[in-house]
Image (cartoon, helix red, strand yellow):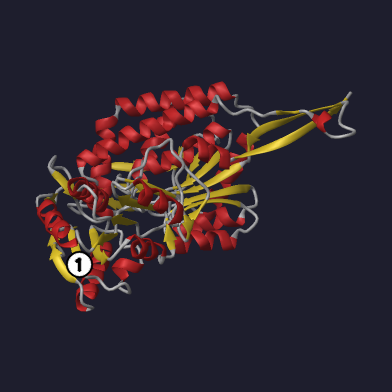
Amino acid sequence: MIEQQLYLDGAWQEGAGTPREVHDTWTGEVVGHYAVAAPEQVTVSITAAQTAMDVPWPAHERAATLRRAAALMAERSEELADLLRREAGKPITAARAEVARCVQTLSLSAAEASRITGESLDMSVVPGGEDVTAYTLTQGVGVVGAITPFNFPLNLVAHKIGPALAAGCAVVLKPSERTPLAAGALVRILHEAGLPPGRLNMVTGDPAEVVGRLIEDDRVEVLTFTGSAQVGWDLKARSPRKRHVLELGSNTAALVMPDADLDLVVNSVISAAFAFSGQACVSLQRLYVHEEQVEALVEQLRVATEALGVGDPAREDVTVGPLISSAALERVEQWVDEAVSAGARLVTGGRREGRALRPTILADVPASARVVCDEVFGPVVSVISVPDADAGIRSINESRFGLNAAVFTRDLGVAMRCTREIEAGSVLVNLPPAFRTDNMPYGGVKDSGQGREGVAYAVAELLEERLVLIAG
């Protein structure tokens, strides 16, 4: 049983209200409690962060702290993976992979702390600048408010904290109320690694109260948020003077051309659509298939999907575990039923396995169905026939989202055309559209957000330059 407190100014503190329960996503058992912050405790965390910014923290110390944290995380990898399994319902093999990626994220952040530099300017290129020396100082922008989701409760938290600390910023973290224990485990590791007081603060409790304080307090210079488009754009509208890094939702698409390697496509679709029950913003949701391939591909997908392990995330053979909540499960079921009622064909899945939904393939899905238009965030993929690349690209771009997209083809010309014409932050060729490494730039266009993550790119979002001019 984990009793999670608030982390304020380098110390663990009690909250102001009755601690709330955290449940095992598969069994429903209580695995811990998390503290509820009073509004004034959020303000205390911001004050601690602002005060910490006034205390020098050299880059070599920032890098050393992040390296020690990465080493501690690696030592505790199995313990952390088990926590992800219980709290988030993440299948144990996927949980281990997330811990390993989190180690990488912290290690990459340590490396970036040592690479932050300014530049010199030759002022003699303009008249009157001959006797002026000029250079820039690069420094962290200030206090960062970090708001994270449930689906990658270690690595997405690390993607907020690691680059911010590397840049020399201080952070107030508001993790998902669904998965606060994993975030707390990461904070404890950073504390043990020697993090100075105030550089990282964690407040949990009522999301509206905590986030409201982060929005309203002018000392918070940046809001970095991963979550739904509706919430993300509302944050920006309510705090127009702040900087924002918004990693929002999507209904990720892939295009399969008639010359594609179907075995590659099947393996890619299975991993991209159904890993962690489709609860990732880059989970494959819309599969546009050339009409010459569609029937053969649907049958191969059916066979591969029905072979997947579903159920208890503690089992090594399980790929598809529970959805994060009963409400999420009911919503996804409703969307599938709506699509079938509107004329879609249920190829496989669509029924419960305990607290999980069996991975679901729909065919002949109307373009207006919510499983096509909106973000499902569940193990559902819709297969839609298209006559050519033009129709496929057009269908992909009709979405209001634009995070990741993929194309499967052996034709280099078609592949390059897709990279130019598909409206997305990333276009992948012959790779699963859910593919991501922690060093690459990651982010979307349209309703999928603004700004980029990926450690070096996230650091750049959190830096500002000061120009120095010296006469003589």
In the picture of the structure, the residue carrying the numbered disc 1 is: 363
Q: Nearer the viewer, residue 132 or 20?
A: 132
Q: Nearer the viewer, residue 93 or 121?
A: 121
* Residue sitting at x 20%, y 77%: 343
* Horizontal and vertical percent position of residue 224: 51, 49
Let me know if residue 367 appears in the view: yes
Up the image or down, 336 lies above or below 265; here it is below
Q: Secondary structure at mark 1?
A: strand
* Horizontal and vertical percent position of residue 268: 24, 47
Indicate the quadrant where residue 104 lies.
top left
Position of 148 compared to 341: left or right? right
Task: Tell me the quadrant of the picture where the N terminus can be found.
Answer: top left
Total marks placed: 1
* Horizontal and vertical percent position of residue 139: 64, 34
* Residue sitting at x 70%, y 31%: 137
Task: Tell me the quadrant of the picture where the C terminus can be found.
Answer: top right
Indicate the quadrant where residue 392 lies.
bottom left
Up the image or down, 239 lies above or below 468; here it is below
* Horizontal and vertical percent position of residue 195: 50, 29
Indicate the quadrant where residue 92 lies.
top left
Let me know if residue 24 appears in the view: no
Position of 448 compared to 356: left or right? right
Instruction: Give the class, few, some or many, for how many residues have Cα within 10 Å of label 1's Cα (few <14, many ≥20).
Output: many
Position of 296 compared to 213: left or right? left
* Residue sitting at x 60%, y 57%: 216
Three-letter code, disc 1: Ala
Position of 454 compared to 408: left or right? right
Q: Nearer the viewer, residue 469 or 200?
A: 469
